[in-house]
Image: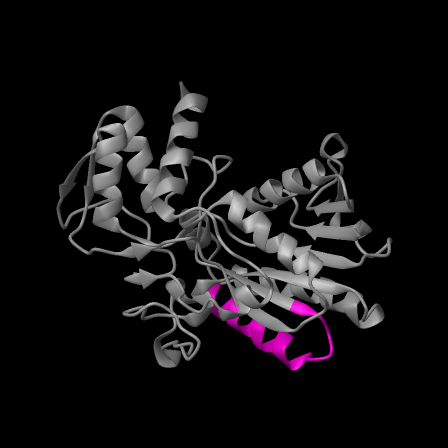
Amino acid sequence: MKIAIVGATSQIAGDWISHLKHQNEHVVFLYGRTDRPELGIKSYAAFGQENYDLVANFVGVGDPARAAALGTSILDITHQFDELVLGYLRQHPGCRYVFLSSGAAFGGGFELPINESSCASFSINTLGTQDWYGVSKFYAEAKHRSLKDLGIVDLRVFNYLSASQSIDARFMINDAARAIHSRSVFKTNSLDLVRDYLSQTDFCSLMDCILHHGAINMAVDCFSAAPVSKFDLLKALNVHFGLQYEVTEHIDSVNATGVKLNYFSSNHGPAHKLGYTPKLGSIDNAVEVISAWGVRQG
């Protein structure tokens, strides 16, 4: 299969590229902002000069701090690169498309985990900085469902954690990992959030399922073998790494897309339809990744 990857320099794209190279079954074309011959990456200007069987669009934001910094420009960025791929599909309707979406496409709330009946919710009269990322994904997904004759899978990632990710990113798990390695006290508030940390292995497994499945137009929620509450995770990190933590209402954190109490999905049907079964739960993945970060930093 001939696969084009747009946004090839992103961290999650890099994990999948490594997986594809290990498989050695596909011809892979990589595209980024600039030519990087040492990585086999061509600039976006070269996109469309080859024939592809599938295009994967990884252009996006992998860090809450960067999402906050981008502000409204994420709307234009998402639209620009989505249209780049859709323009190719209009000329080559047999090509399939995987769009890396996000749980943020559901907007605010998350008092309960996402299920098959969940609705997106945006406060249309008071849209703000925390909404732009989710709105950009929501709009792209709506457009994709309208193109029902094209094979487009919107892959919603809620939380992704791999050893290739920077420990300096501003996610809660990264903040805790830095506290472990600096032997400092991790400070958190009393909200017992629930997260589902998808592993590199399971993400690549789900991508394999999409590759091997025929053309289909739908959204698929990513999930691990088991989500975890914040305090269960912190207890596990205390046991495995000796993490010390303190509950306080005054913390330094980045919530670029708003506070989400239960930021994960129980809508497993679409992924199961593709043949996906996750192998690693959130705690096991977190322990593996933080261990790998420690080796890399040490």
Q: Residue at x 13, y 46 (%)?
A: 248
Q: Residue visible at 31% across and 71% down?
A: 109
Between residues 40 and 33, which one lies in front from this camera angle? 40
Q: Farthest residue in the top direction?
A: 298
Spot occupied by residue 54 in the image (x, y as percentages of width and height): 75, 58
Residue in the foreground of this view, choosing between 67 and 17: 17
Relative image position of residue 256 (x, y in whole percent): 37, 56
Residue 39 magenta-highlighted: no
Q: Main secondary structure of the magenta part?
A: helix
In which image quadrant can residue 186 be found? top left
Q: Is residue 159 left or right of residue 216?
A: left
| Residue 110 horizontal side relative to residue 60, left or right | left
Relative horizontal placement of residue 295, taking residue 277 as reference (left or right): left
Residue 58 seen: no
Q: Work out whether 50 lies above or below 220.
A: above
Left or right placement of residue 60 versus residue 237 in this view:
right
Q: Which residue range is magenta in the image?
A: 133-152
Measured as percent of width and height from the top left, residue 138 is found at 51, 72
In the picture, the quarter occupied by the C terminus is top left
Instruction: Name the residue nearer the viewer: 159 or 286.
Output: 286
Residue 47 shows in this picture: yes
Query: Taking 248 as reference, is 263 above or below it?
Result: below
Name which residue lies at 24% across and 25% down: 183
